[in-house]
Amino acid sequence: MDEFWNNGLKYNNRYGMWIHEGHSDFEYSDGEEIENRLFAIVSSASDVSLHSQELRSKCIDWPSSYHLHPSRANLLRSFEKHINGSVLEVGAGCGAITRYLGETGIEVAAVEGSLNRARIAAARTRDQQNVTVINANFNDLNISQKFNFVLLIGVLEYAGAFSDSTNPHVELLKKAKSHLKDDGVLIIAIENQLGLKYFAGALEDHLNKRMVGLHNHYPNPGVRTWGLGELDGYIKSSGFPLTHYAYPFPDYKFPRLLLRQKSLNEGPIINTTALIRQVLSGDMQIDPSRMQFAQECVHEAAQRNGLTAELSNSFLILASENPNVMERISNDSIAAEFYSTNRQKIYCKSTQFIVQDQDILVTTCMLHPNESREHLSSNQFQYVMCPEQPSYERGNPLSTEFQDIVSQEGWTLRAVFELLSEHLNFIYSLENGHSPQGNLDLSLAVSGSFIDAVPINVLRGVNGLVLIDQEWRYRADISYLYLLFRSITVLFRCCSFIAMPADSTIRTQKAVFSELFRFFGHDLNRNEVENFLLIEAAFMDEVLGYPVDPIPYDDWAEFVCPYSEFHSSRDIRSIEQHVSDLQNLAGRYMDQIRWLESENERRRLQEEDLNNQITALKADLYDKIASKSAIESNLKKENENLKILLSNFLLRDHERR
């Protein structure tokens, strides 16, 4: 593609990419320190492939996960067989999607306005000859080449921030269309202004504020998103009469589930709610304690009322003016696809729900079937390929019942215990052929083949409980104690919202686990927990493919359960009132103390004044006593003198006679 990009572009040998002459760098960044760290990670990595364990181990926060994690590519996997020829990716960022597209073998031209991000993308694709990275403002590129696909992944919402046009989003759509071949397809991924998570209290993704999108308080000019109807209108008015929508959950950034439109249509449908409820807690941008309600519970009513699409947190849209292309895409037999990609490459898979003869076929596809399977069995764990299911098992996982329990304010651990008890009794009956006699003894051993038999993999179907998706086995027996520990852990992790329980004093993870174990008649101790955490860490070592340190016991024990602040408002108001009363009482005591202190000071001054007066009186008295003594001494002398005078007078008088 060198000759094509020579016009207005200069190749930068240092970064291995093209730079548009006169381009002013975008003021759009995660921060220089973060992006320099990302560049250092990617440029020094020996493996920059999509599923690089080296890069995935560096996903320690939101920016590194967003730019490096292989799950980003799940957005396009369902349409991979349709994406061919050449692709123009606008707003490539740090190359997460670019890398995936390059590995499919197609020609990719990736345009990114930020120099820092473009150099990271170039480093991420440095070994892919079919990928060209360009640092430029897409609006300033005057190019004549046509592409089979143009991608706007997380880009359309920023149109107003980087354009002076009065209708920047429409202009961007039209410019994208100008670069498409006659049978070309535009692919858009964008957040939904009316996404359910925003009603639930999530911060708007771009502006980091509550309700700003719902209230339509977007800055002008600046970033903004739209709802389904408005967005579809803009796309069609920009020259794309035909559109095909898909709905990624929890959103398009890290999709674990992609619902196709046919999964929402009348006819043979799947239980979309059950699938959605499994993935919403994976939204890393959500703080469960700030949520006002449980999205997972609301989606059930949304499905019944045909609102799943309108309330989806984000959209994936394919648009074209070519009916043959759109018909081929729309007639795809995949109704939904569930992804498991937060694991090492050999274990990454997708589960497809395929419409077939008025029924749903469930099939598991390894994303890298040609990878060596030598490591599918470790010393402790064994991976088992899940067989193809001849028909779709309709039902809800027990995890959805747990979500229903903890989404109600005033829920109890007793209700959770009853659900867990039913679950463990079911596992016992599978292994032993009958239910336990009386209360289940948690110290009993159970086959390691049940290590994955957690509530999220147990369906309550038409004919009772059914165990599904058992892809992991432990090579030794495990105890029901450990299976219970795993089950509680998984259940709480699958919630994007937890209301305040009846006993609001049970706040720490240790308190919750200990209380639930006591219901089973067992006192959970530190040694048991530390052992369970070691097994969990070893399990994650196997799944991820790199060492994972076990969670320290104190960190595990002191973790505070993310009960919703909204649903605990009454408790908070009660506590706040109590604190206010205490503050008022303390205020009164302080006033009394200050009055006593002032009285004490006044009396001290009075005492000091009296002491001064006494001292002065004493001094005056001493002076008077001294004066009296002097007078008395003088009088005595005068008296002696008078006696002498009188004696002399009498003597002379006698002599005269």
Image (tube, grey):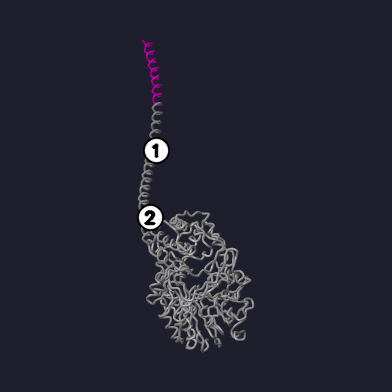
Pointer 1: what residue? 612
Q: On screen, 573 above or below 11?
A: above
Q: Main secondary structure of the magenta part?
A: helix
Label 2: how many Cα within 10 Å (few below 14, some 14–19, many 20+):
few
* Nearest to N terminus: mark 2 or mark 1: 2
Q: Nearer the viewer, residue 315 or 509?
A: 509
The boundaries of the magenta stretch are 630-657
Q: At which x and y percent is residue 267?
A: 41, 80
Q: Is residue 191 visible from the viewing direction of this image?
A: yes
Q: Position of 402 compared to 373: left or right?
A: left
Label 1: how many Cα within 10 Å (few below 14, some 14–19, many 20+):
few
Q: On screen, 140 above or below 30?
A: below
Q: Residue furthest top?
A: 657
Q: At which x and y percent is residue 613?
A: 38, 37
Amino acid at dot 2:
Val
Residue depicted at x 50% and y 81%: 187
**Quadrant including the C terminus:** top left
Q: Nearer the viewer, residue 248 or 528?
A: 528
Pointer 2: what residue? 579
Q: On screen, 177 above or below 207?
A: below
Q: Nearer the viewer, residue 131 or 475?
A: 475
